Each structure stands twice: as structure tokens, then as C-alpha cells.
Image (cartoon, rainbow, N blue to C red):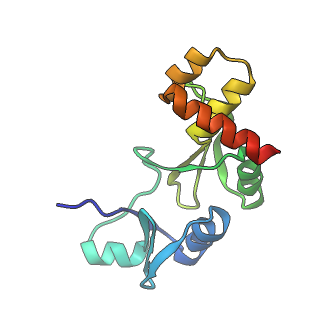
Amino acid sequence: MKYKSVLLVVEDIERSRYLYEKVLSQTIVADYGEDISFEGFSLHQKKHFENLLNIKVNFQSNSCELYFEDDDLEKINSLIKENHLELVHGIIEQPWKQKAIRFYDYDKNLIEVGESFDNMAYRLYKENYPIEEVLKLSFFTAEELEDIIKRKEKAIN
């Protein structure tokens, strides 16, 4: 058996397509009209899905979330507001020090955008956390952290 994808049922496939494709910069792999496949997940039109399975779909279970990474959480926060999406919480630092923001898509599917662990490790390094602590929190080796620091410093300069 091979795992393929998560499927989210949505009320308005075009509005949801706009959100995931244009706002969250996801790449469409296939568009079947009432079913759109992105890399790692799919959207399915509610009415069509209900008819296929002869069931009723209820939104906002909060039992799972889609997770994305982006190192510019301020930009994501602005996009959430511009697109009238409901925040679950603003930018927070989670117990393992990664910053994240969570919100609902238009159909109350829970979305998390977290900074990459590379960015988290570099940020902690710049905030003068002890190297041992950065390694422990990020699960990077000393060599990996050194490479991340060099890469980030080069990108800045």
C-alpha cells in the first residue's frame, strides 16, 4: 500500500483553489473540476463528495490540520487578514521554540504555518541561545547547524 494524499472537502472549490494556489502558493498537480490535487493534498467539492458517498459532510472538526512552512510569518499574518480568514491564534512561539500561526480556511479546515526548523535554529542562534540548546531543540547535528548558519549569513550578505 502506498500513501497518496489528504482530501479536504470544501463548499466552494474555486474560492478554496484561490486560497491554496494564490495565497498559500501551492502547486496544482491535477484539476478534475470538482476535485483539485495539489502536492500532498486534494480539495473536493462538497456537493459532489456527498453525492458520491451518500453522506452529509460537517465542517470544523479540529481533529487534523494541514501544516505548511514559511519563514515570513508576518507576511502570512497579513495574507490571512487580507483574505478575511479566521485566526485561531496569531504568531506564537511553541514550547519547542518554533514560531507558528494557525487559522481556518474558508471551510473551517485548520491550517498551521510554521517557520522552518532551519530558520528556527538560526533565529535561536542569533538570539544567543547556547549552541547545545539549539542543537537539542532543532535535532540538528553541530555540522548541520554550522551549515545552516553559513547559508543564512551568506543569504543576508
Q: Is residue 107 visible?
A: yes
- Judge from the rendering whether residue 43 lies leftward or rightward of residue 119; answer left or right: left
Q: Is residue 99 visible?
A: no
Q: How many numbered discs, if any? A: 0
The image quarter containing residue 126 is top right
Give residue 9's position: percent from left, percent from top: 42, 66
- Judge from the rendering whether residue 105 lies leftward or rightward of residue 82; answer left or right: left
Give residue 111's position: percent from left, percent from top: 54, 50
Residue appearing at x 67%, y 34% in the figure: 149
Give residue 69's position: percent from left, percent from top: 58, 48
- Judge from the rendering whether residue 27 lies leftward or rightward of residue 125; answer left or right: left
Q: Nearer the viewer, residue 43 or 76?
A: 76
The image quarter containing residue 15 is bottom right
Task: Name the image quarter holding the N terminus.
Answer: bottom left
Residue appearing at x 45%, y 85% in the figure: 33
Q: Is residue 50 above or below residue 124?
A: below
Task: Name the image quarter holding the C terminus.
Answer: top right
Residue appearing at x 58%, y 28% in the figure: 94
Give residue 84's position: percent from left, percent from top: 72, 58
Q: Is residue 13 above or below residue 149?
A: below
Q: Residue furthest left?
A: 1
Q: Residue furthest bottom?
A: 33
Q: Nearer the viewer, residue 6 or 147?
A: 147
- Judge from the rendering whether residue 123 lies leftward or rightward of residue 28; answer left or right: right
Residue appearing at x 53%, y 23% in the figure: 135
Q: Is residue 47 above or below residue 104?
A: below
The image quarter containing residue 52 is bottom left
